[in-house]
Image: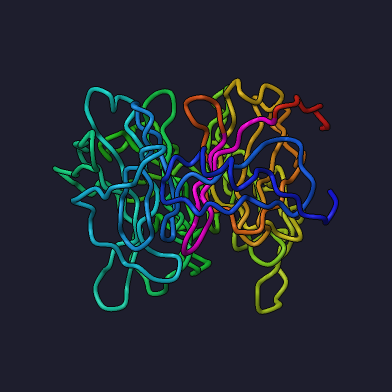
Amino acid sequence: MTSNPIILASLAALLVACGGTNADTEAVVLTGTNDAFIATPVATFEEPWAMAFLPDGRLLVTEKKGTLKVQTIGAAAHAVDGVPRVAYGGQGGLGDILLHPAFATNGLVYLSYAEPGSGDSRGAAVARATLTLDPKAGGSLSNLTVIWRQVPKVSGQGHYGHRLTFDKEGYLWITSSERQKFTPAQDMKSNLGKIVRLKDDGSLPPDNPFAQQGGVAAQVWSLGHRNVLGLAFDAQSRLWAHEMGPRGGDELNLIERGANYGYPIVSNGDHYDGRSIPDHDTRPEFKAPAVTWNPVISPAGLIIYQGSLFPAWRGSGFIGGLSSKALVRVEFAGTSAREAERFGFQKKIREVEEGPDGALWLLEDGPDGRLLKLTPPAEPRLNRS
């Protein structure tokens, strides 16, 4: 890519597209030339973290300070009442939002968040609640029940993880990062540094790989993770997850039953204080990543695209980049993967989702983070991968 920025859409076009919403109507600017999509601002949020589309086409958007909003495209956003109190600060606050697979009939949603503990401790939690929507405003949560918690709660405000997804069988998957404490990622008496598999009510599937150990180990599907902020299944039901590694060690992993991904014993990066960490190839008993990044991209959010609006990208993974200020496209070939291309933005990208019509939707990170809709340009693009 070149370094000359281009404006993807005119201010007048954006004003029409935004329909008078609270979006910042300045045109989106990329850091390089781009003929792959047009990016249109739709709305603006305060430290947005995650989003999920409702069956009626509206969006649920979480804000880190503890607000859940319903966004109608082309209109104002409204708050949802009944959100639990969150431990806001650092990387902590309100996190992911996920609809139950049968949401259309049961109205259940799942929220992840940083939960305050005793003293100076905190930990990620996942709650399930019934969402009642107001067609003209927001809505409310009722019967909210915490179905999972990180064990133990610890000090600090980093590395919660708490990304959520469902598989085709209806199991709930949760990323539980190691809270910047390193060694719990290898400790089966803790669920920190793990990927967790539960039934939709938080109970334990009897076929989890460590079920016979009991305790929190019975929740665990894989271990040896650092800070997992993206989780998605491909069309063949393979589970992929990316994690922020230490300095120079971001990873994309194919998640396998009972596998140990090695952190903090091995990593393709090094500690931030300069201490070296042995690479994965020195310890073959640990599962090596499919892709590593150095320089890092600071991955956040992950989808594997299945839509028809960008047919050349069907089956590709899309990762939001924080420090890289990018949208990263990954191509898969069975159990292997590679970065195919990267689209640079001027702001950090926190979240990426696929819309009902196949458009790509992004959330910028931080104060005044915009919701961006990505649609194909007027002229078809040649696939350059």
In the shown orientation, is residue 342 left or right of residue 141? Answer: right
Query: Is 69 or 171 nearer to us in this picture?
Result: 69
> Residue 336 location, x and y as percent?
72, 34
Q: Residue at x 38, y 60 (%)?
A: 64
> Residue 199 location, x and y as percent?
31, 34
> Residue 221 location, x and y as percent?
46, 41
| Residue 195 vertical position relative to residue 93 in the rendered view, above or below | above
In the shown orientation, is residue 381 left or right of residue 375? Answer: right
Which residues are drawn in magenta? Answer: 360-377
Q: Residue at x 37, y 70 (%)?
A: 154
Q: Residue at x 77, y 28 (%)?
A: 381
In the shown orientation, is residue 153 left or right of residue 146? Answer: right
Q: Residue at x 75, y 50 (%)?
A: 6
Quadrant in the rendering for residue 57: top left
| Residue 237 vertical position relative to residue 217 in the rendered view, above or below | above
Inspect the magenta stretch and tell me whether residue 375 lies in it.
yes
Would you say the magenta stretch is mainly helix, strand or loop? strand
